[in-house]
């Protein structure tokens, strides 16, 4: 595979339970601070309580108020996009003269929060169609484009928990193919009762705070949020030199085709995705400064990731940030991409909160403490139901 042409990343934004914006999230990560709690957005009849990582209402910017005609996933995406565009130094009026694309990864954020409507309909009633109109307006990519007045290409990627990482890889290709001048790309997802109950039924959710890669790990905690990046064409970058925070230099994607919800035990798809991303970046494994692992805290995921990282990227430090955010599903790749480029800029990574005791079944373990990193490249990977695997590699930009 030929090296992929680097694409500049000029802005980043995110909000999740760790913080209201990227700077606040990084401050929480390096302080080792987290606050999982029982869900307050919905109720269930489970006798056990499973902690989640909710985004407090106070974290939403005043310019993005709650809208009864918009679902929460779309609101999260708009909020993160506004931060990313401001970080990139763009005025909205200037952008409306350009070809601006929007691509957002999600899982089920807009599809499963209409329980009352479905219940009434199945019971023979004639429920108000407001819920359906809200659903149709809440495609996250379309909602972001409508909010800012962009009319370039749109895509919502629904590829389970690799959705946002795939969205970023696709966005870079849109720019290489000259489909647009600038792309807002990332992921957004909200907590809802259906996914909460679904993961409990799969018996991969922990009743305690998540412990990625720890010997005593028993499963994930769900979370919500959004992470969006601004990617720009070479022509735009030349008009505004010195703006790049990073460059997306490699992307790989591969499917295990092994199991609906479990990764291939030998990490077959993840290995192919890693090799494709490394080839696209034109780099050797030893040039990677650190890896943002998927690190959900489930026994299967962490075992496969640990073994694959030990074989493909031996000696490279890695971490999981899901101990701070929970597993935000379709948003995870976007949030963690923002974390990855910010840590690459700072030349350090936080400790993996929740990890305390090494698992003798795992050949390598994540960093426990804040760790200085060396090098100009960092990698973020996402594993997903359906056997999806996606990997992106960033290089430091001029603002680093």
Image (spheres, rainbow, N blue to C red):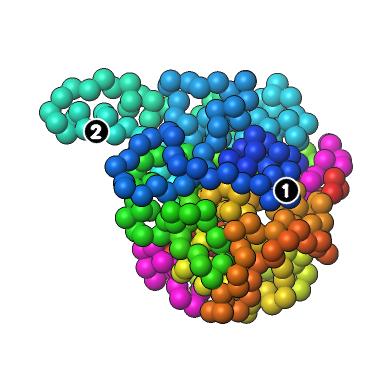
Vertical placement of 161 versus 318: above or below?
above
Identify which residue, 272 or 52, lies in the foreground: 52
Q: Secondary structure at mark 2?
A: helix
Query: Per the image, is 266 magenta?
Result: yes
- Residue 125, compared with residue 301, is above or below; it is above
Q: Residue 351 occupies which quadrant of the picture?
A: bottom right
**Residues packed near mark 1 inside 10 Å, few (<14), some (14 to 19) or many (20 plus):** few
Looking at the rendering, the stretch of residues picked out in magenta corresponds to: 238-267
Q: Position of residue 214 (x, y in %)?
A: 56, 67
Q: Which residue is mark 2?
A: 118
Q: What residue do we see at 68% from left, 32% from top?
A: 83
Decide if residue 275 is in sight here. Answer: no
Q: Which residue is mark 1?
A: 31
Above or below: residue 321 compared with residue 194: below
The magenta stretch spans residue 246: yes
* Residue 65 in picture, x, y percent from top left: 55, 21
Main SS class of the magenta portion in the image:
loop
Q: Residues within 10 Å of mark 2 (few under 14, many from 20)?
A: some
> Is residue 65 shown to the viewer in this render?
yes
């Amino acid at each position: 595979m030929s090296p992929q042409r680097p694409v500049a990343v000029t802005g980043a934004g995110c909000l999740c339970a760790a913080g209201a914006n990227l700077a606040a999230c990084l401050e929480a990560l390096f302080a080792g601070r987290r606050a999982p709690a029982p869900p307050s957005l919905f109720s269930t009849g489970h006798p056990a309580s499973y902690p989640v990582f909710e985004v407090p209402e106070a974290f939403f910017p005043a310019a993005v108020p709650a809208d009864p005609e918009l679902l929460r996933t779309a609101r999260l995406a708009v909020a993160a996009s506004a931060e990313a565009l401001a970080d990139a130094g763009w005025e909205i009026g200037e952008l409306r003269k350009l070809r601006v694309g929007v691509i957002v990864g999600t899982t089920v954020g807009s599809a499963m929060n209409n329980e009352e409507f479905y219940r009434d309909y199945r019971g023979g009633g004639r429920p108000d169609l407001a819920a359906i109109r809200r659903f149709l307006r809440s495609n996250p990519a379309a909602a972001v484009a409508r909010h800012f007045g962009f009319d370039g290409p749109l895509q919502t990627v629904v590829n389970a928990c690799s959705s946002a990482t795939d969205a970023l890889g696709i966005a870079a290709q849109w720019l290489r193919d000259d489909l647009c001048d600038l792309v807002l790309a990332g992921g957004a997802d909200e907590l809802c009762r259906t996914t909460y109950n679904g993961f409990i039924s799969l018996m991969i959710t922990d009743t305690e705070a998540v412990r990625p890669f720890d010997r005593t790990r028993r499963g994930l905690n769900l979370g919500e949020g959004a992470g969006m990046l601004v990617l720009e064409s070479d022509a735009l970058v030349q008009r505004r030199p010195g703006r790049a925070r990073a460059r997306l230099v490699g992307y790989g994607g591969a499917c295990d085709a092994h199991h609906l919800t479990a990764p291939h035990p030998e990490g077959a798809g993840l290995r192919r995705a890693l090799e494709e991303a490394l080839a696209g970046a034109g780099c050797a494994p030893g040039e990677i400064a650190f890896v943002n692992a998927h690190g959900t805290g489930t026994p299967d995921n962490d075992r496969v990731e640990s073994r694959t990282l030990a074989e493909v990227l031996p000696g490279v430090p890695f971490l999981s940030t899901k101990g701070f955010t929970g597993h935000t599903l379709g948003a995870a790749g976007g949030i963690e991409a923002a974390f990855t480029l910010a840590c690459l800029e700072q030349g350090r990574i936080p400790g993996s909160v929740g990890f305390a005791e090494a698992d003798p079944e795992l050949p390598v373990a994540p960093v426990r403490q804040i760790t200085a990193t060396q090098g100009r490249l960092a990698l973020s990977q996402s594993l997903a139901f359906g056997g999806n695997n996606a990997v992106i590699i960033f290089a430091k930009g001029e603002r680093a």
